Image (cartoon, grey):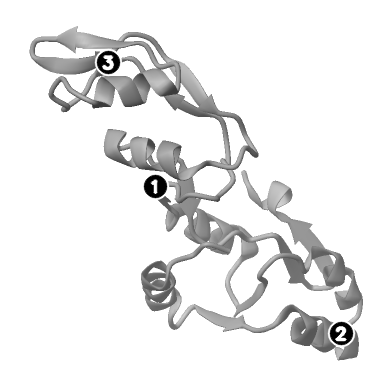
Amino acid sequence: ENLPAKQLRNMRAQLRGKVLLIMSKKRLIRLAVEQSKKQNIEQLETYIKGMPALLFTNDNPFVLFKLLKKNKSNAPIKPGQKAPKEITVHAGATNFAPGPIIGELGSFKIKAGIEGGKVAIKEDKVVAKEGDVVDAKLAGLLTRLGIEPMEIGLNLVAVFENGDILTSQTLDI
């Protein structure tokens, strides 16, 4: 979900030759799992959520998980998206000249002042908790401050290998 086409294209290019990536509708993937003759594969059905994709490889699942985790990148949050984690604006100098930015920071209860001709944030402030929906005003401010809380990439949820199902918690060593 929320994976830009450019990012997906780059991931496909990096995985080419090692991994076959198939994206389809959730219903078609469920039908394929149900009709498969492989033993215990029906247990995968509980992990088919959101916008699923299937990855087929001969590589070790731990290597695949590490590769997918390494290829994730940060991105700015967009209006209407949920905060994936607590978003904090940290204290320190900014690149902004004094002006309306001080009022914008104040509207989110961020203490700011002027130091050396630039706007400086006086103390850390949590502007969104995990799961909060971010509005356009906050998303714009975070982008201007260079805060990129979103992590973009493919999430490996579960792996089916030799009749066993390994979850991402098991693979994340």
Residue at (43% x, 67% y) in the render:
4
Going by the numbered disc 1, the residue's amino acid type is Pro
Q: Which residue is mark 3?
A: 92
Can you tell which quarter of the image residue 146 is in?
top left
Task: Tell me which label, 1 or 2, sits earlier in the chain.
Answer: 2
Q: Which mark is residue 76?
A: 1
Q: Which residue is mark 2?
A: 38
Q: Is residue 170 above or below residue 103?
A: below
Instruction: Measure how far apart labels 1 and 2 are at the Cα level.
Output: 41 Å
In the image, is 136 to the left or to the right of 100? right
Residue at (15% x, 8% y) in the render:
115
- x then y, percent, for residue 53: 64, 75
Residue at (45% x, 16% y) in the render:
109
Going by the numbered disc 3, the residue's amino acid type is Gly
- x then y, percent, for residue 62: 61, 58
Going by the numbered disc 2, the residue's amino acid type is Lys
